[in-house]
Amino acid sequence: MCAPRVQESVLRRLSRRDFLKFAGGVGLAAGVSACAPPPPPVAKPSQPNEAKFSFSQVVDLTHTLWPTFPTFGGGQNYEEEVLFTFEKDGFNMKRWSLVEHTGTHIDTPFHFSADGWSAEQIPVEKLLGPLAIIDIRAKAAENADAQLTPDDIKAWEAEHGPLPEKGIVAMYSGWEEFVNSDKFRNADENGVMHFPGFHEEAVLFLLEERDIVGIAVDTLSLDYGPSTDFATHYAWLPQNRWGMENVANLGQLPPKGAIMVAGSPTIQGATGGPSRVIALL
Ligand SMILES: [Zn+2]
């Protein structure tokens, strides 16, 4: 017999929705009845993705990170120190000092909640999925404070069909072309930034009406630049969803058909971190 607390601790780790799937599969029988110890925080693989796909093209959705890459706060938040050089020591090694939210990076659920998943706790199968790219370049070109709204999602679906289950939704605002200039932050004389983001209503729609594991933006923040309440972050991340900021090269992909892999770091307790983001097409 399993000690009751073993079962409890296993079940506590699972949301109700995950539990129902877990209980319906072999996981419950194998994991709990066999009295195995509870899995470590990063259970792998708890929900194997049964979708089969092939790909012929790989697109890097990651910006190269350099010391003065634009930051949300405006300062430099990345430094490196050379520890060893090949010339002197026979090998190269550096030490980095950086803010977690630098460059192309993941926002974990823990970033905006007390007990959401930190980086190493995000189940690995939730870090990839079919990618839907919603192009709002036209309205972003007219208004730097444009937001991706439920109407943008519905317009995408009218053309391309329903958003894919367990998918990832990316906002394509075209902001990437400004990454080497001040326009990426686009701060006005009062320091208020102006760039596009997801509207809170859009992520509430995704949470309530669709099955989406993560969202991505080609700007510095999930929320649009002028936000002071971070309503989108607060609506989305605490629901154990993640966001990816400063993604690149969305224009090299079709609106649907690619699989996105969010290469999150696995640093214990991380609220986010520079990530390698790859699309398979
Ligand atoms: Zn961030």
Image (tube, helix red, strand yellow):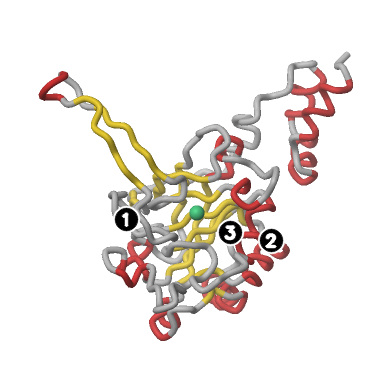
Horizontal side of 137 relative to 112 (left or right) equals left
Query: Which residue is the extreme one toward the bottom?
Result: 142
- Quadrant holding the N terminus: top right
Question: Counting other residues with Cα less than 10 Å from the Cα at mark 2, is it few (<14), some (14-19), or many (20 or more)?
Answer: some
Horizontal side of 126 relative to 54 (left or right) equals right
Query: Which residue is the extreme one toward the left?
Result: 87
Residue under circle 1?
A: 69
For discs 3 and 2, the disc positioned in front in the rendered view: 2
Residue type indicated by callout 2? Leu
Q: CA gap, disc 2 to disc 1?
A: 32 Å
Q: Earlier in the sequence, mark 3 or mark 2?
A: 3
Q: Quadrant of residue 194?
A: bottom left
Residue at image position (56%, 71%) is: 227
For discs 3 and 1, the disc positioned in front in the rendered view: 1
Residue under circle 3?
A: 164
Q: Quadrant of residue 190?
A: bottom left
Q: Is residue 195 in view?
A: no
Residue type indicated by callout 1? Phe
Residue at image position (74%, 29%) is: 26
Residue 80 at x, y percent in the picture: 29, 39
Q: Earlier in the sequence, mark 3 or mark 1?
A: 1
Residue at image position (34%, 51%) is: 60
Residue under circle 2?
A: 207
Give the secondary structure at mark 2.
Answer: helix
Residue 131 at x, y percent in the picture: 49, 57
Residue type indicated by callout 3? Pro
Q: Earlier in the sequence, mark 2 or mark 1?
A: 1
Question: Counting other residues with Cα less than 10 Å from the Cα at mark 1, is it few (<14), some (14-19), or many (20 or more)?
Answer: many
